[in-house]
Structures are given as C-alpha cells and as structure tokens.
Image (cartoon, rainbow, N blue to C red):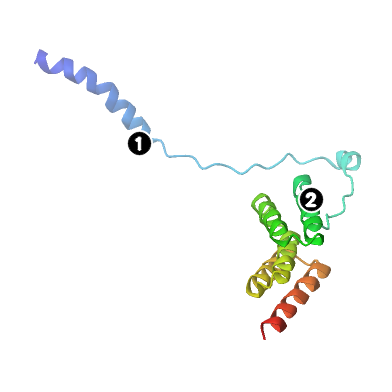
Amino acid sequence: MKRYIRPLSYLLPLLTIQACAISTPPQKARPYHPPQTRQSDTRKTSVPTAPMATPATNPSVQNIKNQAIQLKNKGQLEAAAQTLERGLRIAPKDASLWSQLASVRLQQRQYGQAQSMAHKSNNLARGNRALIQKNQNIILEAQMQQR
C-alpha cells in the first residue's frame, strides 16, 4: 500500500490543477465603453470638427510624387515609373500615385497597363471627381490608341 501512496501524492496536485482549469469556463473579452460624460462636461470639451476631405499625405510619398513629375517632364519615363512604383510600395492605396503611373504608362505606349492602373486609381479615389475624370481620360486615350 505504501508503494502506491508516493506516486499518488505526485499525481494528486496535477489532477487538481487540471480539474480547475477544465471547470473554469473561459471569459469573453468585454468591449471597451468609454465612461459617459455628464452634460456639463460636454460643453467644456466638445469641439466641432470638420470631416477630412482627403487623408494626410506621407511626406516621403509627396517627395516621390514630385520627383516623378520632374522625371516625367524631362522625358525620363522609365525612371519616373520606377519612382512611382517605389511610392506604391510605401503607400499602395494612394489613388494619385496609381493615376500618375497610369499616365506614365500611357506615354510609354503600354496601353493595357495604363488602363488597369487608371481603373485601380478610380477604385481608390473615393469621390475625388477631378482624379476620376483624369483617370477616365487616360482610359479613353489608351482605348483609342489601341485601335
């Protein structure tokens, strides 16, 4: 009998811990609800904010856009395209970068790419009518050149 007591004395704490772990149901995470402010507090802290029309542009992306414009104006289309592709690796959802690259591809006579990039830019433009119109012009020009 004594020879069974020692192994059981090792197993008993392990079984107890496992039983506690199994018997306690996991708790769901509760969503955070900020404390409600009293009416008098809201007058002091509420500041009217206007919705942002366009998201703030990353300064490095803006530099890339400017550099690409300069290269394009100099006729260095391949360097401009590479610069814009670098910008898209930084900000892949920047509609104006896609539009600029579509414009460069149009000048390079890569009409299929120009169209697809202009469509991508339109999908990301979110109501920027001027950019959408510019992209539509790129698409139409590419279609006309392909005929």
Q: Residue at x 75, y 45 (%)?
A: 60
Residue 23: % across, % down: 36, 36
Residue 43 lies in what quarter of the image? top right
Could you give the CA–CA distance between mark 1 and mark 2, rounded to whole angstroms?
56 Å
Q: Disc 1 residue type?
A: Ile
Numbered circle sitting on residue 62: 2
* Foreground label between 1 and 2: 2
128 vs 71, nearest the viewer: 71
**Residue at the bottom extreme?**
147
Q: Which residue is mark 1?
A: 22
Q: Is residue 6 depicted above or below 117 in this figure?
A: above
Q: Are marks 1 and 2 in contact (CB under 8 Å)?
A: no
Along the line of sight, which residue is nearer the eye, 76 or 17? 76
The quadrant of the image that shows the N terminus is: top left
Identify the residue at the far front of this view.
75
Q: How many marks?
A: 2
Give me the disc on residue 38.
Answer: none
Q: Along the line of sight, which residue is nearer the eye, 72 or 85? A: 72
> SS for tag 2?
helix
Q: Quadrant of the C terminus?
A: bottom right
Residue 112 in sight: yes
Name the foreground residue: 104 vs 56. 104
Q: Position of residue 26 (x, y in %)?
A: 45, 39
Using residue 45 as the reference point, say whether residue 147 is left or right of it. Answer: left
Task: Using a 10 Å C-alpha cutoff, classify the residue at mark 1 as few (fewer than 14 neighbours), some (14 to 19) or many (20 or more).
Answer: few
Q: Is residue 118 above or below residue 48?
A: below
